[in-house]
Amino acid sequence: MKIRYYFVFSKYNNLLRVFRLVGNLYREQVLTGARFWILEIKLSFALW
């Protein structure tokens, strides 16, 4: 199963990490703000 994005949240340090499938490998995405936008489906993901 090829999931395009997955999110990992650490409750110990409140850190959100986002990974995107590129080819056959997952690459960590750089979070530049409080939200992460998935432009393909016009959806944003944020913690609050």
Image: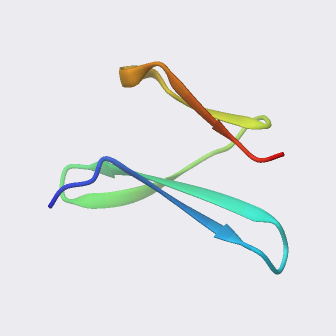
Screen quadrant of the C terminus? top right
Screen quadrant of the N terminus? bottom left
Residue 28 is situated, as x and y percent measured from the top left of the image, at: 51, 56
Q: Looking at this rendering, what residue extends furthest in the front direction?
A: 48
Above or below for 20 versus 37: below
- Res 12 quadrant in image: bottom right
- Number of labelled discs? 0
Above or below for 17 versus 33: below
Above or below for 33 versus 14: above
The residue shown at (42%, 56%) is 27
The residue shown at (51%, 26%) is 43
Q: Is residue 36 left or right of residue 42?
A: right
Q: Nearer the viewer, residue 15 or 48?
A: 48
The residue shown at (62%, 45%) is 30
Q: Nearer the viewer, residue 45 or 30?
A: 45
The residue shown at (35%, 59%) is 26
